[in-house]
Amino acid sequence: MPDVIINGVLSRKAGGHNYYFGTLDASALRSLTYVPLNEENPKPCPYLNEQQDGYQRWGSATRMRAFKNYLASHPSQFIPPLLLSAKDWTFVPDTAGGKFGALHANGLAAIVDGQHRAGGFIAHFEEDEIDRSVDFICYVGLDRSAEEQLFLDINTTQRGVDKGLSAYLRGGEGVVIAEALNTLADSPFRGRVSKQAGQKGQLFKFHSFIQGLEKTFKHGKLEHLSVDDRVDALIQYWSIIADVFADFWEVDVAILDSPDGGRQKMESKLLELTGFLTWSNLGPALLGEAYSETHGFHWETIRTRIQACEAFDWRKHGQYQGRTGTAGASYLKAELERLIPTHDHIPLTDM
């Protein structure tokens, strides 16, 4: 008698190997699978069977519990199937020569890909008493060499979803605002933001762009602004910056868009992530102090303050050479704050 019979299985064959698509209950997962480790786990996993003399590193119980929490908060979400490899499982078709039937599971199948997902499913069952269905693809009859090669192929050729695309797919107000800035005709950033691999003429990845835009409104007076109001304010704010620093902005845009140009050849930091984060970090003070709930933004005051910085050295190889990225943006923000006048009288009309 087989240990377990898994019904409703689809049989496939490719490259001389048989593999099967099926579903089993999370409650059966621990008793049917193991992880072939290449060395002993100093902290044995509480959720998975682990065996040595294999080819994998041990997994992270923390990541498994995090996936368990994801399952708890997304009870109907599709989860990619586990990839298994079994030596002695056999397929019994419903009809002679048919592609559908049952897998007779004898012994343990190796988890070739998905040990953190498997651990999360098991933890969800054992700790939360939720017995989820677990989709799998199971190769049957692979020798150890072929199984190891399958593991290597998956882990050396697969690529995760780009962070920019992930940010876009998650949605939310930040995505709506960023997409507006990337598409509206009057936006200084139209067409400059990439969701996946950056294309020629693009400046920022979507997730980095969103983070900068969100920093801009970190001021109590601005928290209630609608999405449309934020889009309008950002277009106006960055249009002023582009105008005040036109010498840097226009030169780098021309370099960016030229046939033999590109981001690497730009001459200043202003249109790099460093400059973008610098002005995003300055946004709360510049915009918040010049905003009134009754009159909106006093743009002339904001322009005056930015104009006080027009002699600032944005050159890559200038005064602030080497000041780049998040840390560089914080440093440049402090330098600019020395130049920006404060406590101006802001009229309550014409705002």
Image (cartoon, grey):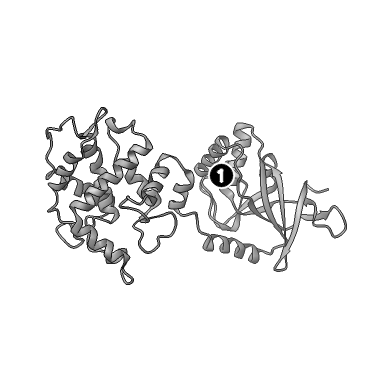
x, y (%) of residue 185? 35, 52
How far across and how far down the image is residue 95, in percent? 87, 55
Q: Quadrant of the C terminus?
A: top left
Residue at the spot 80% in from the left edge and 53% down from the top edge: 100
Res 184 visible:
yes
Q: Quadrant of residue 74?
A: top right
User: Does residue 321 appear in this view?
Assistant: no
Residue 24 position, x and y percent, is 71, 44
Q: Is residue 197 left or right of residue 54?
A: left
In the depicted structure, whether residue 306 falls above or below residue 159: above
Pick out the residue farthest to the bottom.
260
In this picture, is 251 found above or below 178?
below
SS at badge 1? loop
Rendering coords of residue 125 (x, y %)? 63, 36
Q: Residue at x 32, y 50 (%)?
A: 186
Q: How many marks?
A: 1
Q: Residue at x 67, y 36 (%)?
A: 131
Residue tagged by mark 1?
A: 45
Quadrant assignment, res 220: top left
Determine the image quadrant of residue 227.
top left
Q: Is residue 302 left or right of residue 41?
A: left
Label 1 environment density (alpha carbons within 10 Å; few <14, some 14–19, many ≥20): some
